[in-house]
Amino acid sequence: MRDTAPAMNDQNSTSSESTWRCTVCGFLHRGERPPRGCPRCGSPTPEFLPAGERTWLTYDGEPFDVLLVNGSTHRAHNTSYMVDIAERELESRGVSYRRFNLSEYTIDHCWCCYSVKAEYCTYPCRNSQDDMPAFHQMLATAKAVIVASPINWNNMSARLKDFLDRTTCMQNLFHLDRPGLTDGKVIGILISGHEDGAIKTALDISLVFEQMGYILAPFGIAFRTHGSQYNSGTDAEFFRNDEMIKNDVRGVVSNVVELMLLDLESRLKGRLVPVSE
Ligand SMILES: Cc1cc2nc3c(=O)[nH]c(=O)nc-3n(C[C@H](O)[C@H](O)[C@H](O)COP(=O)(O)O)c2cc1C
């Protein structure tokens, strides 16, 4: 988690208090509990997490089926709600998964070594000083990815864009005539927004995965927007009372799982011709 220049209300602290960090803006709060909303960025209380020291994310090597990624700036808001539904569906189907909210992790911009020379973009990635190497390993392990993004200016979130830019070293394996690590895996996409741009956002995301050899599940995109005529502050309540979101997210999860169970990844191993732009 990035340490932004913190503001801290540390007067009158007692030993039972601990430090809480807003995962959105980095505001630090000392107290027994996180504050009622972030005084700096206005995010709701669930965006706060204990502010302990953390080391880079590591992957323990245990196989699992689905990597579930919440690409929102908010770990617990509208996009997260869709991911919560997906999580419950995976649980009910007995599918092993791991969920990550990108706002809780440090993922640097891509250094774009590829732009200098294709051979410079190596796997593992040259940047091992953040959480991305563990995500690379999990992408190579999981049979499917379900990724969720808010719409930001008719596109994916900047956090998710950084995450996807950092998969260039996996996509570049094909350019370097090395065996791919992701071909034949399955992708499903969840999009939350306020007014418009969901399909474009979903297709932008799907194109990146397509270039890594992923297969978009049939009916593999779920999206929901509320409407520009409403204040965005009413979106959360709308989302949580909307049956369509629940049904569509469950549907995407189910379709991802059904395709995953066909194990096309094994059946296509060595049979695909990598074609890229
Ligand atoms: C920078 C920014 C740009 C946005 N652009 C769009 C947009 O183009 N289309 C849209 O429907 N919603 C847009 N929104 C609204 C978000 O998609 C919406 O609030 C979403 O619920 C945010 O997800 P979260 O609650 O997980 O943060 C934008 C929000 C922000 C902050």
Image (spheres, helix red, strand yellow):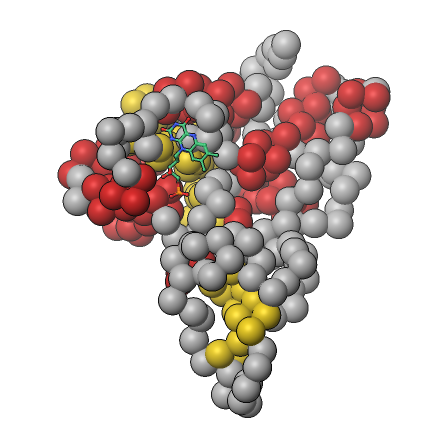
Q: Quadrant of the N terminus?
A: bottom right
Q: Compared to 55, does 100 lie above or below?
A: above
Left or right of 260, for residue 6: right
Q: The C terminus lies in which quarter of the figure?
A: top right
Name the residue located 75 percent from the left edge and 28 percent from the top edge.
Answer: 112
Pick the front one: 174 or 116:
116
The quadrant where ligand 1 appears is top left
Q: Residue at x 53, y 47 (%)?
A: 102
Q: Position of residue 148 (x, y in %)?
A: 42, 37
- The answer to whether residue 274 is above or below residue 34 is above
Kindly tell me whether residue 174 is visible in this rendering: yes
Q: Is residue 165 above or below residue 76?
A: above
Return the residue nearer the eye: 51 or 12. 12
- In the picture, measured across the screen, residue 182 lies left or right of residue 237, that is right
In percent of width and height, residue 201 lies at 44, 24
Res 269 visible: no
